[in-house]
Amino acid sequence: MDIKLFNTLSREKETFKPLKKGAVSIYNCGPTVYDTPHIGNYRTFVMDDILRRIFEYNNYEVTQVMNVTDVDDKTIKRSRVENVSLEDLTRKYEKLFLYGLSSLNIELPHHLTRATEHIQAMIDLISVLLDKGVAYKAEDGIYVNISKVEDYGGLAHLDIKAASRSRIANDEYDKENARDFAVWKSKSADDGDASWPAPFGEGRPGWHIECSAMSMKALGPTIDVHTGGQDLLFPHHTNEIAQSESATGKPFVKYWVHGAFMDVSNEKMAKSKGNFVKLENLLDASISPLSFRYWLMTAHYRSPVNFTLDSVRAAQNALIKFMAAMATLPDGGKVDQDYKDRFTGFVNDDMDMPKAIALAWELMKNQEVTPADKRATLLDFDRVFGLKLTEAPRFKEESVPAEIQALVDAREQARKAKDWKKADALRAEIEIRGFEVDDTAEGPRIISK
């Protein structure tokens, strides 16, 4: 079954066709490790994880690369504020980032690449740009001349003729004005020890050149899929395309996938606005990271979501109910092919996780599928969901004494006959004997007190 993705470059949903049959190369824009990510950032990383899982579900051989930006304007500034070395600062926040991935059951990328470990690749790439006349040297570093770049701004549908032309040294800048951007910044006192020797002068890389150099070193000049948040469309991803394609003369990325923003109080969540929420804030509110992951999957990745504690708590209650039902399902079944086909159709259609979640609930309530087959099929779905359904607490029927099972069976007969007085009396008898009955959609679940 074909996989379809909405390609930001074409603004259309396209059928995925890999560069190499049966294989897919994926580059994810990773964290800038100057602080712990907020949950809006983690929405993108959950999207990345689901995309990888979908390709693996479809039997693709996946190579996933994610960068760690451990040298840029933000990391250097934060290291000065905290009065620690750049390496100590970035390693600390990298560790916290990885802890967050684990909490959300996000699989580690096959390659987690640090910018500081790829400086030579960046210098080599900048040298090519200089040789081709696309980049030029200025008093404070090396810049890409965007007027020399064919179709600059095409990804973001930006009209550079109407934009102001000037140089900009900052890694992040006005989202409307196209400018010559820095790929190398000359050494300055503010950078401390964050500088490296290069043929064009000692200094450090700009943020944009880092991803191009690392992705091409790991995956080659053209990659299948590049992902990131919608906020990276311009200037970051636009500049990645400009410098990469100018250097190689080849298409940089076939499919661009961008996730939508997460709002809080109907305003974009961002550290710069001070309205962000972190994973530890969810834990303080007694919300598990897996419940947050479940909540994210109830909305399409290209649709903005508005975070509220109440909405995530409701998702957590739903997940608890689902896990409780999973606990009643026995092993030994087989995957229901009809449900598997429908599930594959949903997840392959531009990651339509809301429909996939709804299908899982439909299956759970379907009395025509045996409990064992339900379990096998739902565990198959969880290869994409990543909700750790195998860890739902199991109840062993053989641990229930025969006389208790007989009382439970008699109570079920009374309930079917709508003899509620007798059913209540039998429940009381069961509880006196040290057991409880939880009535689920799959039938009574017996719990030892």
Image (spheres, helix red, strand yellow):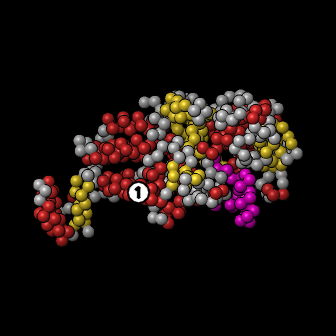
* Above/below status of 289 relative to 429: above
Question: Of residues 24 and 293, which is closer to you in this image?
Answer: 293
Q: Position of residue 226 (x, y in %)?
A: 60, 38
Q: Main secondary structure of the magenta part?
A: helix
Q: x%, y% of residue 205?
A: 76, 47
Residue at image position (67%, 41%) is: 234
Task: Tell me the residue that label 1 is attached to.
Answer: 314
240 relative position to 416: left or right: right
Horizontal side of 270 relative to 164 (left or right) equals left
Judge whether residue 209 is colored magenta.
no
- Image position of 179 with respect to 18: above or below: below
Instruction: State the residue lying farthest toward the right.
Output: 139
Quarter of the image where one finds residue 409: bottom left
Chain part drawn in magenta: 67-92
Q: Residue at x 23, y 44 (%)?
A: 367
Other-residue count near label 1 (Cα within 10 Å), few / some / many at <14 / 14–19 / ≥20: few
